[in-house]
Amino acid sequence: MCGITAYRGPTAAASRARNALERLEYRGYDSAGIAARRPDGSTMHARTLSGVAALAVVVGEEPADATTAAIGHTRWATHGEVSEANAHPLEDCGGRLYVVHNGIIDNADALRARLVGAGHRFATGVDSEVIVHLVEQAQRPGVGLGDALADAVTHLSGSWAVVVLDARSGALAATAHGSPLICAEAGGGTFFASDVGAIAPEVDEFRVLEDDDVVEVDAAGPRWHRSGGSCRPRGLWPVPRTALLASTGRHRDHMGNEIDEQPLIARRVLEALSPGIADGRLWRGLGLPSLDGIDRVAVLGCGTSLHAGRAVAGVFSRLGGMPTRTLVASEVAHEVWEPRTLVIAISQSGETADVLRALDSLPPRHGTVLALTNNTSSTLARRSDAVIDCLAGPKVGVAATKTFIAQVLTGVCVALSGLAAADRGDSACVDADLRALAATPDAVAAALDTWRGPCAQLAADHARASGFLFLGRGAGLVYAAEGALKLKELSYRWAEAHPAGELKHGPLALVTTGTPVFVVDNGDPRLDVDIAEVTARGGRVIRIGERVLNVGGVALHLPRTGPSWGPLESVIPLQMFARELALRLHRNVDKPRNLAKSVTVS
Ligand code: M6R
């Protein structure tokens, strides 16, 4: 994933920008670069395909690193090949301005043609290069770097987080639109970064640039602009304690490490939140209204976050007996809202445009919005009445795994706390759910151990299968849906999830000899009949979560009732199988084709 860092301050700017890049390395990248201004006005500009470590050599050659302004970038190519020339920082025609950019410029081709016509010389094939030439064009005597950048971005369509270095003056200017960028001050210097983890050891607090804010930093310090005029700096956020907790482990891909980290994440969430459940403290501490004053809970999100929302919704409806809806965020526009609705908006990134648009469509005085996010300084968090951090730590792989577990558990803790605060739910059922919740980290760990070998074998067995079915009932259905999403996203094979009861109404026609059919077993006895329907047609059933007792060589299937959010640990083998199959098919499991980590267009 692309990462931006920048620093302007008394000394060692290049080292600081480089060290920050090192902290972004875990996100994955294919090239890196840095540009810095030396005290004599000359520029250091280095780009490499050999990793951030290679930049250390260049920076180390700087005598006592007296650089006072620097920008750095890690690039994960999406547009333009992986090459040193395409790595950022990108340079203008005159060797004075340097730009780092995250995002996509949709009208880059048209702008490039116009700029070439006006005499600009392009050195790369990447969309980002138009920005540096636009700033160059806008910079005239009497126009500051911030104003030049503000002018330049009026020509852009797409998304951007940009920092420009004027190597002659040592000024920096930054702006953002649909792509995150933060600014922080510490030790007499100013930092910019696309991810708080990049500067977490250096600063205690940071500010988030809202869309189209421009921050210019020169000898007088940072100045905030908006549409030509100055504006007050945005509010301060504390650096979250999970900012530096990226998953590490034995796998070469991030997804494998993120899957393995899930027992730890489950423990982290429960340690932080479960003490506030029984007495309703967690709910009240978020400033949420009593559930007695709520007529409906509406949970919304997209993709995996929507699935997490469906699991959480089960606590309100199954345990709390509350009218609860789950809504696909991109379809919310035509909803009819009841006045006393609690909206729970779930988004790992907190920047998903469909979720933000869904909030736009809420009528005035619609009720309370609770954001459940992995990014408490995100746009979603800033626009909600209450925010809960899902505590998953930095996520690198595009496919959501550890964030799913974290979202479900965070949401479950909040929901249970809300029911406790309002004294709702049958006490025996609540107790059973609390016991199941406490046992989740071990259940997730056991699922990892149990399924590691079998998943690899299953992937080998099904490498040629062109399609997969995923079935479930009741609270198990959402995990079947998540398994199908993971599989199609990673392996590019067809995967459909259905309520098992719907089989005979159509999907059964897909089943033939050897068709792989995953069944998430939540203990519903009707699944036995569903499974028989599949096996009778030659389908191969892979049953996840069944409890079997072996009595004298005879397998007895035990009924069980799971918690109100369903058999969460059943998602583990489904994630593992999707990854194993994708690796076997030589897919890039961290960067599936056509998909982005944060979907900032609706
Ligand atoms: O950042 P968000 O949680 O709002 O993202 C929503 C979806 O785009 C996301 O969950 C997507 O479905 C996953 N990458 C799938 O693994």
Image (cartoon, grey):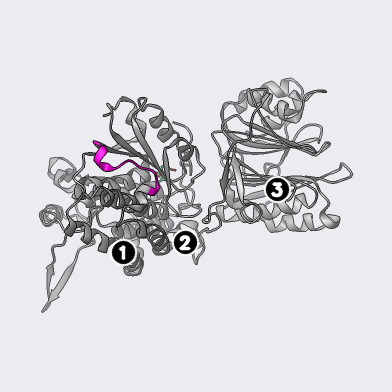
Asked which secondary structure carries label 1, the reply is helix
Mark 2 burial class by Cα count in 10 Å: few <14, some 14-19, many 20+: many
Residue 36 located left or right of residue 412: right
Instruction: Report if the beta carbon of the residue with label 3 is closer than 8 angstroms to ligand 1.
Output: no
On the image, the x and y values in percent for residue 293 come to 26, 38
Of tags 2 and 1, the one toward the viewer is 1
Q: Earlier in the sequence, mark 2 or mark 3?
A: 3
Q: CA distance from mark 1 to mark 3?
A: 46 Å
The residue labelled by disc 1 is 438
The residue labelled by disc 3 is 33
Q: Name the amino acid type tagged 2.
A: Asn
On the image, the x and y values in percent for residue 35 come to 75, 45
Q: Earlier in the sequence, mark 1 or mark 3?
A: 3
Whether residue 385 is in magenta: the answer is no
Q: Nearer the viewer, residue 465 or 153?
A: 153
Circle on res. 257: 2
Of tags 1 and 3, the one toward the viewer is 1
Q: Name the amino acid type tagged 1.
A: Ala
Counting the numbered discs, the total is 3
